[in-house]
């Protein structure tokens, strides 16, 4: 749960910059739309209120200015509440008697003040009234006039007008948000391009990222990353130079030691001295093999610039590998067999492909028991060509299967003589050219099967 919170952030504090921008922009636009609607309601409410007040005054003046008192036409309450009809009251000159009313059921007395006032005739929302009380006439016997209108109708009318005016804003808001989303997505596209460029980097030869299309805001970050890549390249180059120089410096003295040991063989007496001499010779041979493996590994780790690819016939390459390693097979009395039932051609440097198969076959020969069997097969599996290298050795414990490709890792209890670099070299060369190595213990018999999946697009 904590990991998910750290990786994605809470919904109100997302880790994504694009999501943060969208949330802020959406919030600001929604808030602006709400404030616009509110101010529109207030403005149109004031406009409607003033316009209706003017109409009430005109109605009142039309009754008070007439020499012949008019009698207002009666109406029902529905007209007053739903249509906002004006209710006209005609009072006696002293204001104590209601002579006529367009809605007699409304019991609102004549207001003592002249002009506009707000009156509540009950607790209900529709019981609030806007009242205009006209001035008394010039004659003492002239009736008094009072005009009323329902306040709830006024509020509804102002709200309806504000909603109609705000409808275009409400309709344009989703369009504006969509445009914002597209703009933010387009702005973040450069970030995704930088991420793709970083993901496509080769760990053996990282290159600097281009600043041509990088936004100014993240240009310092990309620049710092380029500086880090430069330091990483320098560290890798230093490591490769050290391994190469050390291996080169050790190759000559180790070859001289091997030559001296070979010259001493005839002078070693039989018995225990011969046994100790053989152990010494095996140790020197193993050291020479390790030096060669280190040189090979350092060359593979170096950036491959201008490595020429060629069409390589896998069957011919396998036969050459088997022939070259027959010396080791004969020394350990291992029976090596080759079977090719399909044709496959791969476009890659021949030396790199030889490195893959030489190390797998060499590994099988070293772990197969004396008098054992190693089979190399080129065949079709699941519709594409594969190469199987099978031995009848001890296999690999399941617990160590995930580490056998690590450099210098050797299976506990394995026979002496290996360097722990063969499988690492084979996998590095294979991955460079689209091959995949799969190791698993044999089910039909004792031993290990190393399967190399050739690129499907290049196999024939």
Image (cartoon, rainbow, N blue to C red):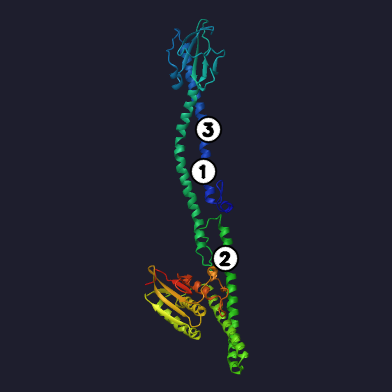
- Residue drawn at 59 percent across, 73 percent down: 239
Q: Which is nearer the eye, 370 or 454?
A: 370
Residue 5: x, y in percent? Answer: 57, 51
Can you say whether 352 is above or below 41 in the image?
Answer: below
Q: Quote the CA–CA distance across marks 1 and 3.
A: 20 Å
Q: Which is nearer the eye, 360 or 279?
A: 279
Q: Quote the CA–CA distance across marks 2 and 3.
A: 56 Å
Q: How crowded is mark 2: few (under 14 residues within 10 Å), some or many (20 or more)?
A: some
Residue 105: x, y in percent? Answer: 47, 13
Can you say whether 378 is above or below 164 in the image?
Answer: below
- Residue drawn at 48 percent across, 29 percent down: 159
Disc 3, SS = helix
List the single residue furthest toward the front: 445
Q: Give yes or no for contact between labels 2 and 1 (Cβ–Cβ under 8 Å).
A: no
Residue 165: x, y in percent? Answer: 46, 33
- Residue drawn at 52 percent across, 50 percent down: 18
Can you say whether 434 is above or below 185 in the image?
Answer: below
What residue is shown with label 3?
A: 39
- Horizontal side, residue 290 vs residue 90: left or right: right
What residue is shown with label 2?
A: 229
Q: Which is nearer the eye, 384 or 158?
A: 384
Query: Foreground mark, 1 or 3?
Result: 1
Q: Which is nearer the eye, 5 or 15?
A: 5
Can you say whether 25 is above or below 418 in the image?
Answer: above
Q: How crowded is mark 1: few (under 14 residues within 10 Å), some or many (20 or more)?
A: some
Q: Quote the CA–CA distance across marks 2 and 1.
A: 38 Å
Mark nearer the N terminus (2 vs 1): 1
Which label number is shown at residue 26? 1
Q: Which quadrant does the C terminus fall into?
A: bottom left
Mark nearer the N terminus (1 vs 3): 1
């Amino acid at each position: 749960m904590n990991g998910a919170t750290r990786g994605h952030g809470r919904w109100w504090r997302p880790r994504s910059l694009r999501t943060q921008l969208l949330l802020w922009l959406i919030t600001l636009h929604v808030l602006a739309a709400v404030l616009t609607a509110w101010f529109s309601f207030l403005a149109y409410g004031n406009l409607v209120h003033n316009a209706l007040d003017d109409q009430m005054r005109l109605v009142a003046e039309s009754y008070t200015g007439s020499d012949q008192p008019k009698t207002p036409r009666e109406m029902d309450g529905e007209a007053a509440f739903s249509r906002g009809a004006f209710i006209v009251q005609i009072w006696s000159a002293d204001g104590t008697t209601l002579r006529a009313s367009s809605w007699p059921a409304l019991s609102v007395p004549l207001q003592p003040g002249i002009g506009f006032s707000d009156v509540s005739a009950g607790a209900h929302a529709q019981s609030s009234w806007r009242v205009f009380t006209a001035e008394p006439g010039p004659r003492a016997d002239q009736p008094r006039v009072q005009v009323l209108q329902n306040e709830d109708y006024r509020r509804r009318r102002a709200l309806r007008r504000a909603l109609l005016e705000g409808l275009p804003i409400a309709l344009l808001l989703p369009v504006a948000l969509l445009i914002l989303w597209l703009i933010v997505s387009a702005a973040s596209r450069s970030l995704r391009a930088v991420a793709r460029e970083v993901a496509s980097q080769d760990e053996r030869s990282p290159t600097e990222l281009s600043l041509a299309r990088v936004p100014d805001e993240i240009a310092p970050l990309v620049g710092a990353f380029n500086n880090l890549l430069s330091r990483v390249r320098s560290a890798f180059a230093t490591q490769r130079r050290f391994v190469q120089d050390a291996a080169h410096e050790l190759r000559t003295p180790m070859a001289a030691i091997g030559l001296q040991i070979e010259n001493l063989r005839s002078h070693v007496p039989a018995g225990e001295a011969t046994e100790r001499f053989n152990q010494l010779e095996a140790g020197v041979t193993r050291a020479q093999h390790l030096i060669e493996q280190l040189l090979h590994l350092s060359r593979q780790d170096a950036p491959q610039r201008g490595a020429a690819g060629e069409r390589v016939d896998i069957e011919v390459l396998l036969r050459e590998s088997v022939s070259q390693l027959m010396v080791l097979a004969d020394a350990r009395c291992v029976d090596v067999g080759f079977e090719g039932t399909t044709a496959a051609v791969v476009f890659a440097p021949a030396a790199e492909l030889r490195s893959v198969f030489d190390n797998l076959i060499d590994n099988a020969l070293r772990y197969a028991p004396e008098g054992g069997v190693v089979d190399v097969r080129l065949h079709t599996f699941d519709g594409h060509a594969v190469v199987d290298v099978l031995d009848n050795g001890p296999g690999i414990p399941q617990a160590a299967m995930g580490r056998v490709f690590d450099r210098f890792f050797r299976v506990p209890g394995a026979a002496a003589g290996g360097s722990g670099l063969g499988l690492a070299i084979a996998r590095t060369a294979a991955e460079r050219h689209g091959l995949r190595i799969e190791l698993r213990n044999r089910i039909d018999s004792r031993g290990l099967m190393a399967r190399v999946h050739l690129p499907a697009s290049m196999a024939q």
